[in-house]
Image (tube, rainbow, N blue to C red):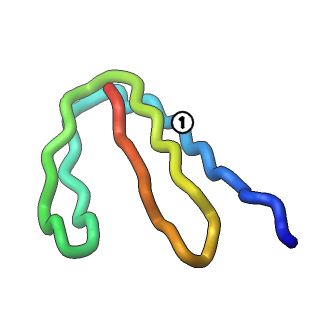
Amino acid sequence: MSRPVSDLLQIELTHPVRFIIGRLGDIDFSAGRYSYTGSARRDSRRASLAH
């Protein structure tokens, strides 16, 4: 049985920026710090984005 694996991405934006995020399309982000955490398991791609 494999162990669950998590991904963590932290980014700091010094100015506003627009990203294209998959099915969500264009998303505008204000300057600031952001963290993305998500499951790397094959059967689940749950994730959250927090500012």
Q: Is residue 37 left or right of residue 48?
A: right
Question: Residue sitting at 73 percent across and 58 percent down?
Answer: 4
Question: Residue sitting at 50 percent across and 68 percent down?
Answer: 44
Question: Residue sitting at 23 percent across and 65 percent down?
Answer: 20
Front residue of 45/10: it is 45
Q: Is residue 24 left or right of residue 5?
A: left
The quadrant holding residue 24 is bottom left
| Quadrant of image for the C terminus | top left
Q: Amino acid at mark 1?
A: Gln
Q: Is residue 5 left or right of residue 45?
A: right
The quadrant holding residue 10 is top right
x and y, in percent, of residue 11 in the image: 48, 36
Q: Is residue 22 above or below residue 29?
A: below
Question: Residue sitting at 27 percent across and 65 percent down?
Answer: 21
The residue labelled by disc 1 is: 10
User: Mark 1: few, some, or many residues within 10 Å (few <14, many ≥20)?
Assistant: few
x and y, in percent, of residue 27 in the image: 15, 53
| Tally of numbered tags | 1
